[in-house]
Structure formats: structure tokens, C-alpha cells
Amino acid sequence: MSIVFSSRRTRFASPLDRHGGGGPLNLEPRDRVAKPNENNVSNTASRLRLTREMQLADTESNPESVDQSGAPSAEPVARAGEPETPPQAATNPDGPGQSQAEQKDPMSQPRAGSPLRRASSQPAQDKDPAGGDTGVADADTPDCETADQSTARMTPSASSDGEDRMGTTIEAKANQPLLRPGTGGGDGKGPPQTFHKRTPPEDFQKTLRTSLRAIWRNLAFVLVLTCATNVLILAIPIYLFQISDRVLTSRSLDTLIMLTAIVAGAVIFQSAFDAVRRFMLMRTAVEVAAQLGAPVLSAAAHASLHGNGREYQTLGDLQQVRGFLVSGTLISFLDVPFAPLFILMIFLVHPQLGMIVVTTALILMVIALVNQKMTAKPFAKANQAQSLANQHLDSMSRNSQIINALAMIPEAVRIWGRDTAQSLTWQVKAQDRNVIFAAISRAVRLLTQIGILGWGAFLALQGEITGGMVIAASIIAGRAFAPIEGSIEGWNTFLLTRGAFARIKALLSNSALQYEKLRLPRPEGRLDVERLLYVPGGTKRVVLNGITFALNPGETLAIIGNSGAGKTTLGKTLVGSVLPTSGSVRLDLMDIRNWDPRQFGESIGYLPQDVQLFPGTIKDNIGRMRADATDEQIHDAAVLADVHNMIATLPQGYETVVTADGSPLSGGQKQRIALARAFFGNPRLVVLDEPNSNLDVAGDKALALAIEQARESKITVVVITQKPTLLSVVDKIMLLTDGRVALFGQREQVLEQLNGPRQQPPEIQGKGD
Ligand SMILES: Nc1ncnc2c1ncn2[C@@H]1O[C@H](COP(=O)(O)OP(=O)(O)OP(=O)(O)O)[C@@H](O)[C@H]1O
């Protein structure tokens, strides 16, 4: 039983390992530093970016250099709402001054759209003398701006020349060491200039081919060693033959010493070669796991979006393949091709003895084939049942609280036991047959050896061969049969491994090639949904029917409707976790399927209805488990979701470790941390699915405030709700009925239609009542 548990548990690498338990958040607002010349000509800024980032390390290691710049570095972020004195030299178009200031203060470029940054607007800093737009603080100033300027304003990494937007520093950043090495808290020096990274193209088939090539290369070397090992094995029978037929008859001590020395050397070499090939196989197994592990998990994660949830079990298949590579069965399989060599040797001793061995080898092969036929079905059934039991075990571990609370343990164990018993029954059936065939083949082998000795003795009596030849032939026959017998015994393992590898191959081969996508400018948050139709696979139920609407950047929309109207499904299609049957969802006019997945994921936020946190610290969860998440980004997201004060009251604060079931957090706290996670990284589109289902009145207010702040930061927000409280803060409302848009428009208009004039907020029909 323990095998079942141990084989199923696949855990995340703990983020704690990565951060060494974490350290306190460093919230020094070094980006608050106002420096002369820092808003200088923007086209030099992009040229200097790499240099400046390289110099960041120097600045960090030498705090004095910051102090010398006269930066008021101790001003806390919490005071970001206070107006800040514009830098005196903000209008100084001194080129060298600009580069110097930027080199000293890497955070001098404000983060786009950050509510904290926006709150402390620095109008003088945001416009460079050339009219370039280097920051976001001017988001408060409703200047006329071109599309490019607007994009630059949204983009932390973008300078007005657009160079950075094409990813000038992305790859440089991607190759940099993690920003939070072992500190658990990042460098505390504000967000990196470029948060977004390009997703490298993924070609799983190519990875599979590369891995297979490496495996075959290793196996070829192992085969050479196997050849040497098998040839050297012949040394002992030849030695015996020589002793009995030459040394004993000639009584030559010299010959004996020489033969013994030769055979001793052969045995040592044979042992060494055997050890080396086993080392090689072990390393091959490790190489398989290392090379295919990440692609298999990645492909499984891709496939699981539209799969049956079993895709992750392919990792278990990889373990099976790895186990086979270090098993004795593979050694037997490798040795089998050399059996003809031994048989040839016996033929050389005497053809009649050779015929005996060939006949036996054929019998053993027939036994192997019959064995395969007789055991394939029961083993397949056993695996099927075991897989069901494992799935049940998974669901038990996920629902352990419900199972305990409702005293469902006996039922859960019964269901698991039923599948396990079925698996064991089939396994016993299969193993029984396997054992029978293994016994038959062993008996055949032993009988053959006896037969060789007996018939050999008869031939010796006839004077056709010597006694030494008989003994040598018997030993060689044993060597020839051993790998054949090993192969028969391990046949089932081979079948399982073949099946496992076929599944791995199918997963990797069927996984869509992920082409490298064009890196687009950071989206502004324009959302266009057109004729969205969703009919879940295998059903005829139309869940979404012709949904069409559009939102401008920074607009907020509430989707309301009865339970089962399709709100959650619509939310999922907006973030790409459900692909529509037809129609399109476009972010900044680009279909979301055409976005680079990583860039798209970083540009959006999503709070699902069923909130799940990852095992790890609160800051890891808010920072989406990213190693390059900075303290400041985490803090900003926490402040925006109004969860910072709640976290501050926890004994370990941001370093509080959350378990898989969310403890020690309450449902509402979990939901608010997930809300902060949704707002992490200053996304442009955020979808919140019933974000206040677990919130109290204070939490509701905080959520409404967060949505207002998001609107100010030009974040497009779609909030799915059953409660009327949030409706007062949104721009637009959509009423979904049976997957169709029943009402959509400005808040007041929709409310009027829903409840008549002057009745706000409305009573929504449905479960929220
Ligand atoms: N994959 C699917 N297969 C079959 N039916 C589905 C699937 N996904 C959604 N549905 C059905 O679509 C309908 C809408 O589901 P959805 O979860 O979107 O509703 P909702 O409006 O969010 O409801 P609630 O407010 O209760 O969360 C439901 O009847 C659901 O059963």
C-alpha cells in the first residue's frame, strides 16, 4: 500500500528552499529619489539601459554611492500618497547628467501604472525635455498623447524610442541571476526595469528527438562494453577446458601459471567493463529524467487544459522508463544478442551439442512469446485499476478536510480499496502466469544443461570430444541461456516500459509546437470580445452564446446573472483558460491565442472562483512564485488589494508559510491574498470571479477601493459578482442570462433597466439575493 502513496505524491519544489526561509521585506523606496537630469533625453536612456543595469550591482554593493547622490532614500512607500517635491533639475536637458543620474539610481524610472507611483505623481519627472515620456506619473495629467506615448506610459521598460519595447533588455534580464537569491525578500530596490520576458519557443518533439539521440548514443557505448564483457566471459570455460585437456595431460606448471594469469586478467577486465556499463546505464537513466522531465511536465501542463486530468501521470511513466534503464532486465536484453556467439562456440565443440542448445533457445523464445500473450491483458487491467485507485487517492488528499468533517473516511477507503483490490487481483493473475512461465523456462534451461553433460559424456565415450570440452560446453550453454531467461522474466517490465514510453512520446509529439511569438508592446488593456460561442467538448450545451462586447483600457465591468448563466465560463475565456468553440477574445486588438503566453500571463490578473494558494510563503504567493518578483512589486500588489495591513498582523508577516489547503489563513484572507496575486506585476487586464464571496464588510470596502484604484491605474477590470455592493464602483454592467448578454451598458443605464430609476444598488435576481 505504501507503494501506492509514495508513487503518487509529486510535490512542488518548495519555494522555501529557494529563499532559504525568507527574510523580511525590504521596502526602501529608492525609486522615490528625485535626481537632477534623470528625465533627460529618452533616446539615451534606452542606449544606457544595459550599462545602467550593470552598474546597479555596484550601486547595491556600495550604498554610499546612493547617499552621495543626495537621495532621500529612507522615505517609506506608505507615504507615497504625499506630494513630492519635483526635482529641481528636472528640466535640465544636460545629457551626461541624465546618464549619471540613471546609473546611480536604477529606480529613477517610475513603474507604469503603479498605484503607489501614481499617487505620488511627479509631473516634472515624467516629461523629458524632448517631449519623450519616461514614466507614468503623468497619467494624472490628461495631456493629449499619441498612441506611442500612451504605450510608453504604460510600459515600465519602454522608452519613447520604442527600442526597449522590442525586448532590448528582456534577454539580458532573463540571463541575469535571480533577484532574490537566498534572501527570501528580493533586493528591495524596486521592480526591475523589465518585468516581462519572452517565452522561448518550445518544440517538444525536437526535445524528444534530442533526448532519444543522447540515450541511443549512451546505449551504443554500453553495447560495446557489453560485447567486451560477453567475450571475456568465455575466458572461464576456455580456462577449464585448457586445464582439463592440456595442463592435466601435459602436467606443465608454466602453462598453468600463464593460463591462470590470463584468465585472472580477463575476469578483472570483464568485471570492470560490467561495472562501467552499469554506471553508464545509471547515468543514462538520470539523463532521461533530466532531459525529459521538464518537457514532459510542461507538455502535461499544456495538455491538461483540454485533457482528462491524467496528463500529469506521464511523469510516473518517466519514472518507469528511468527504472527500466537501471534494471537487470535491460542488462539481459543487452546480453541476448550475444547468445548466438555462445551457441556458435558450442557448435565448435560439437554440432550435436550445438543443436541441443539451439533447440532449447527456440523453446525458450516460444515460452517468452506465450508468456507475453498470456500476461499482457491481466497486467493492463491491473494498471488500469491502479490508475483509478491513484486518482481516487489524489482526490482524497485534496478533500481531506471534507472527508474528515463528514466522516467519509470509510467510504473513501472503500472506493480506493475496491480499485486497489481489483488491481491486485489482476496483478496476482498476471504474476502467477509469469511465475509459471519463468519456472518452465528455468526447468528447460537446467534440463538442457543436464542434457549437454549427458550427451557430451556419451560423445566423450565415443571419443568424439574430451571431458574438458563437455564441461566447457555446459558452462557456455548456461551463459547463453541466462540472458534469454532474464529477458523472459523481465518481459512484463519491458511491456510496461514500452507503454510508458509510448505515452511520453504521444504526449510530447501531440503537444502543439509553441512557436516563438512576436513580442508585442505592453498592452494597454483594451478588450474586445466577439461572437463568443462555447459548447463544452462532448456536450451539446451552449454555455456561451454570441457574447460580444468591448472595454476600453481602464474601464471596469461587472458581470452579473443567475447561477449557471455562464459568468465563470466567460471569465475563463477572457483569461484564456477556456478556449471558445468559436469567436474571439482580443487584448489590444490581438487575439489572446496569438499573444506570447508568458507575456499575456504577465499582462493579466485572474482571481478564480475557487481560490487555491500554492504551498509557500505569502510573498511567494503574491509574487506568483516568481524568483524575480521584487519586494516592492509584492508590496504594491498587497497594498492595492488592501491586504498589507492584514499580513502585517500575522506573526511572520509576508514570510508566513501557507500550506496547500490555505491554512493558517481564513477563507477571506486567502481570497484577499489571491486578489493581491491578481494585481501583482501591474497587469493591464484583471478578471475577478466572485472576489467578495468570502469577504466581510471591511473586505468588501477594500475590494471596492482596489477596483477604483485599478481604474485610476488604467487597469481594465472585469468583476463577476452575485453581490450588488460592487456595482457602485464599476463603469459598466453586463447581465448574462443563459449564456447570452441580456443587458450591457453604462452602469446607470443598466441599473435603470434592472430596477427602475433611483433604485441603487439593485437586487440581482438569483442566488445573490
Ligand atoms: N466543461 C463543461 N462541461 C459541461 N458543462 C459546463 C462546462 N463548463 C460549464 N458548464 C455549464 O455551463 C453553465 C455555466 O457555468 P458557469 O460556471 O459559467 O456558471 P456561473 O454563471 O458562473 O454560475 P455560478 O454563479 O453558480 O458560479 C453551467 O450550467 C455549467 O454546468
Image (cartoon, rainbow, N blue to C red):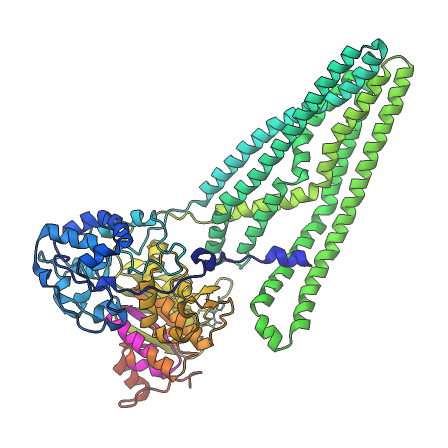
Quadrant of the drawing holding the N terminus: bottom right
* Viewer-nearest residue: 90 or 732: 90
Residue 187 against residue 661 in the figure, above or below = above
Residue 621 visible in the current orientation: yes
Residue 158 against residue 703 in the figure, above or below = above
- Residue furthest to the bottom in view is 758
Magenta span has 644?
no
Q: Position of residue 68 (x, y in %)?
A: 18, 57
Q: Is residue 351 left or right of residue 162?
A: right
Magenta span has 725?
yes
Q: Position of residue 586 (x, y in %)?
A: 31, 61
Q: Position of residue 715 (x, y in %)?
A: 27, 68
Quadrant of the drawing holding the C terminus: bottom left
Rendering quarter of residue 66: bottom left
Q: Position of residue 469 (x, y in %)?
A: 82, 18
Residue at 19% across, 50% down: 46
Rendering quarter of residue 394: bottom right
* Viewer-nearest residue: 91 or 520: 91
Residue 518 visible in the current orientation: no
Figure disc tally: 0
Magenta residues (range): 703-728
Residue 19 against residue 216 in the figure, above or below = below
Rendering quarter of residue 761: bottom left
Residue at 62% across, 56% down: 6
